[in-house]
Image (cartoon, rainbow, N blue to C red):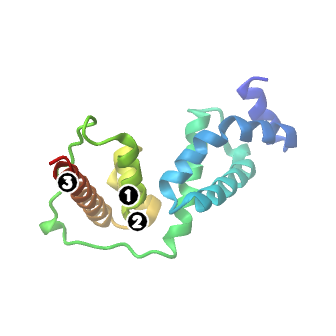
């Protein structure tokens, strides 16, 4: 069955089509949920909630643009919606804000370590970092999604980068000392 037909059947609330759509995209969308969730269990919950929203709103999809992109946006919004009410953003003065250069040498910083330390960032820093650095959203878009100011988005990104830079540098120092 083509994707277009699958979407059409899901719009008719065909349970078998919904199951097939879930099986087709669950792994990719779980990775999105994991980026924005505090832990694995929470990511699983967010995936389920996101698919419920997809099935509720699928009639709104007009076959314009990427269907996968449309679902990804729903997953991100579903996950972030849970944080809007419960977490306070840390706000820095924009005048004193300096974004640290975060250059990563893939030969010295393994990707699995980088993903691990990103996942360990405080929730709001991780969310802003992922939205900006990994998913390419602007600070204005992030501010709208998270219901914050663009300055808060910028400050949270700067703080996330600072933490990541410190962790990477500390890890490199540890490696250098242990090799002596």
Mark 2 is surrounded, within 10 Å at the Cα level, by few (under 14), some (14 to 19) or many (20 or more) other residues, namely: many
The residue nearer to you, when weighing 149 against 52, is 52
Spatial CA distance of label 3 from label 1 is 22 Å
**Image quadrant occupied by the N terminus:** top right
Q: Residue 144's spot in the image, x, y percent? A: 43, 60
Q: What x and y, as percent, mark residue 47?
A: 64, 53
Asked if disc 3 and disc 1 are in contact, CB closer than 8 Å, the reply is no
Q: Which residue is more in the foreground, 151 or 91? A: 91
Which residue, given by chain and number where applicable, does mark 1 sit on? 128
Number of residues whose C-alpha sits closer than 10 Å to that of mark 1, classed few (under 14), some (14–19) or many (20 or more): many
Which of the two marks, 2 or 3, is nearer to us in this view?
3
How far is mark 2 from mark 3, CA to CA? Answer: 22 Å
Q: Is residue 14 visible?
A: no
Q: Which residue is mark 3?
A: 169
Residue for point 26% across, 34% down: 107
Distance from Cα at disc 2 to Cα at disc 1 = 6 Å
From the image, tell me which residue sits under label 2.
124
Q: Is the Cβ of the residue at disc 2 closer than 8 Å to that at disc 1? A: yes
Please state if 74 lies on the left or on the right of 86 as rendered. Answer: right
In the figure, residue 128 lies in which quadrant?
bottom left
Place of residue 109 in the rendered image (x, y in percent of width and height, measured from the top left) = 28, 42
């Amino acid at each position: 069955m083509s994707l277009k037909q699958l979407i059409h059947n899901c719009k008719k609330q065909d349970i078998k089509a919904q199951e097939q759509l879930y099986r087709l995209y669950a792994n990719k969308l779980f990775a999105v949920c994991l980026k924005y969730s505090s832990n694995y269990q929470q990511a699983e919950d967010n995936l389920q909630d996101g698919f419920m929203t997809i099935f509720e709103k699928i009639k709104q999809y007009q076959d314009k643009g990427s269907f996968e992109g449309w679902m990804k946006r729903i997953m991100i919004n579903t996950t972030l919606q849970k944080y809007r009410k419960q977490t306070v953003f840390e706000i820095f003065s924009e005048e004193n804000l300096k974004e640290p250069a975060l250059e990563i040498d893939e030969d010295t910083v393994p990707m699995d370590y980088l993903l691990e330390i990103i996942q360990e960032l405080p929730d709001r820093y991780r969310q802003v970092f992922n939205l900006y650095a990994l998913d390419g959203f602007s600070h204005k878009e992030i501010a709208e999604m998270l219901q914050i100011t663009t300055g808060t988005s910028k400050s949270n990104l700067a703080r996330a980068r600072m933490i990541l830079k410190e962790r990477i540098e500390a890890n490199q120092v540890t490696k250098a000392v242990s090799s002596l």
